[in-house]
Amino acid sequence: MILSFSESIYRALVFLVISCPCAIAISVPLSYFSGIGASSKEGILIKGSDYLDALGNIKEIIFDKTGTITTGDFTEYKLEILDNNYSEKDIINYFISGEKLSLHPIAKSIINIFKNHKPTMNITDFKEITGKGIEYKLNNHYIKIGSSEFCKAKDNSNAIYLNIDSKNIAKLLLYDGIKKDVETKLTDADLKNIFNKM
């Protein structure tokens, strides 16, 4: 009787399991440990075998961390004024007055982008809300700077919003390039075109 290749493999595995079940039981966790160990050597942290199994079904990965695949060095920006009662100079002053007290990396980028502007110094009640933004008082106005959710914006974009007395006054979009060693289908020029259309 002639067996196909797949049938031969199947019968060999059946024989292996019957003759030596302990070796099979030991090899499964060892393969997980090997996979997790090899990943950690490449700087990839996998928190357990369940996550390693899940990786086999992944079709796309979305990175939402500045500095993971991007440089983290924001050099270009777009400022959209939502209330014409405020000038660009006023809006920049509100941004840098609050961000100069923040420890967030994006705050440092904003300060660097607007380094030619001098911030107002008489800020009170400054608070930094982790993962959301900052809030403070300036000249009897309540200021919030942060995500669309934090500032209750309607468009839910990735912009940084300036909210004065519960009204969104402006939004700031920042751009940072892709790291040189990251493999991607998009070029830096492609990303800049996407950024300019936002």
Image (cartoon, rainbow, N blue to C red):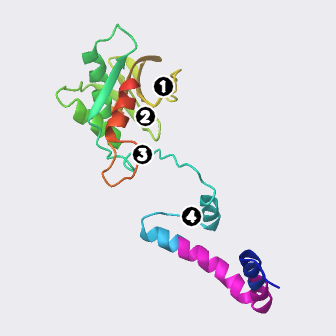
| Circle 2: element type | strand
Q: Which residue is mark 3?
A: 185
Q: Earlier in the sequence, mark 2 or mark 3?
A: 2
CA gap between label 2 and label 3 equals 32 Å
Q: Nearer the viewer, residue 135 or 175?
A: 175
On residue 151, the disc is: 1
**Residue found farthest to the right:** 1
**Looking at the rendering, in which quadrant would you find the N terminus?**
bottom right
**Magenta stretch bounds:** 13-35
* Residue kind at label 1, given as amino acid type: Cys
At 58% across and 51% down in the image, what residue appears? 59
* Residue kind at label 4, given as amino acid type: Lys
Q: Residues within 10 Å of mark 3 (few under 14, many from 20)?
A: few
Q: Position of residue 18 (x, y in %)?
A: 80, 88
At 51% across and 22% down in the image, what residue appears? 155
Tag nearer the camera, 3 or 1? 3
Q: Residues within 10 Å of mark 1 (few under 14, many from 20)?
A: many
At 54% across and 64% down in the image, what residue appears? 46
Q: Position of residue 37 (x, y in %)?
A: 50, 74
